[in-house]
Amino acid sequence: MSGFLPDHPGAEVRVSPNFTARRGTDRPDMIILHYTGMPTAEGAEALLCDPASEVSSHYLVHEDGRIVQMVRESDRAWHAGKSSWHGTVDVNSWSVGIEIVNPGHGLGYPAFPTRQIHAVIGLCRDIIDRHGIAPERILAHSDVAPGRKVDPGERFPWRQLAQSGVGHYVEPARTRNGGILRRGDEGPAVEKLQSMLSLYGYGVEITGIFNDETEIVVAAFQRHFRPLKVDGVADPATVETLTRLLSALPRRPS
């Protein structure tokens, strides 16, 4: 394929060969946000278009707000890797992947520039409008691949996106004293926590045992929805924020 017209008006096109047809659907119902985690934007863009890398995304958003489309939205980009959400394990087939230029945690993890975030918001709103994507289906890479991935990270401004109509969000509960759940705990309270995380969409086994997997998923939840303290410990603020999120989910026809 030598080229295509961009799905998002104003996007530049740089074709990546790293894509296949979507499987089980012909259109996305999720948006997955990433950071590039590389020293330079140029290096990230080249990697996403290198056939030897076997990775790609639909879009790359540069720090100055410039948007590059590399894979058509009708095709399946290779951005999510081993991942799951609400039992869907082929997240690539059901999503649009957006890479956001930022060197990430290993290279200083700077704040995301205002122009870049405005561009991400505009791009997401356009995708949402064209595909009817629900707010709760706009997710972090760390949500669908807990532990394996931490991007776009706790400095990503999810609140600002939600205020602009992108994503599902509630104000995090304030930290307060009370019982906590942590690795090694067992019992009904742990089972309830796991059930709530699973109901929201996270891939966690409901065992009633606060194991390593549960700690990793709690940390992923905190990174997106309670970012001031990401420690994998389910304190009262974490549990209350999760409860608020579930209560704020739209009611779907049964």
Image: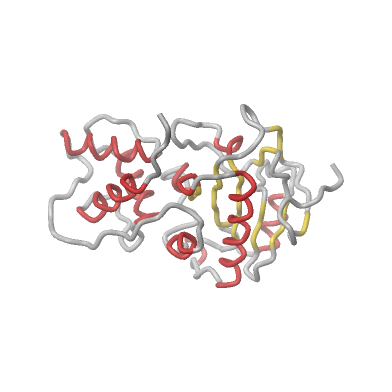
Q: Residue 210 at x, y = what percent?
A: 24, 38
Left or right of 120? Residue 145 is left
Taking the spot 68% from the left edge, 41% from the top edge, the residue there is 54
Q: Nearer the viewer, residue 91 or 254?
A: 254
Taking the spot 58% from the left edge, 37% from the top edge, the residue there is 94
Left or right of 172? Residue 33 is right
Q: How many marks?
A: 0
Q: Residue 130 at x, y = what percent?
A: 64, 47
Q: For the view shown, which residue lies furthest in the left direction?
A: 178
Relative to 107, does residue 202 appear above or below in the rendering? above
Taking the spot 37% from the left edge, 40% from the top edge, the residue there is 200
Q: Residue 100 at x, y = what percent?
A: 59, 59
Left or right of 219? Residue 2 is right
- Quarter of the image with the C terminus is top left
Q: Nearer the viewer, residue 215 or 88?
A: 88
* Color scheme of the displayed model: secondary structure
- Quarter of the image with the N terminus is top right
Q: Nearer the viewer, residue 223 or 45?
A: 223
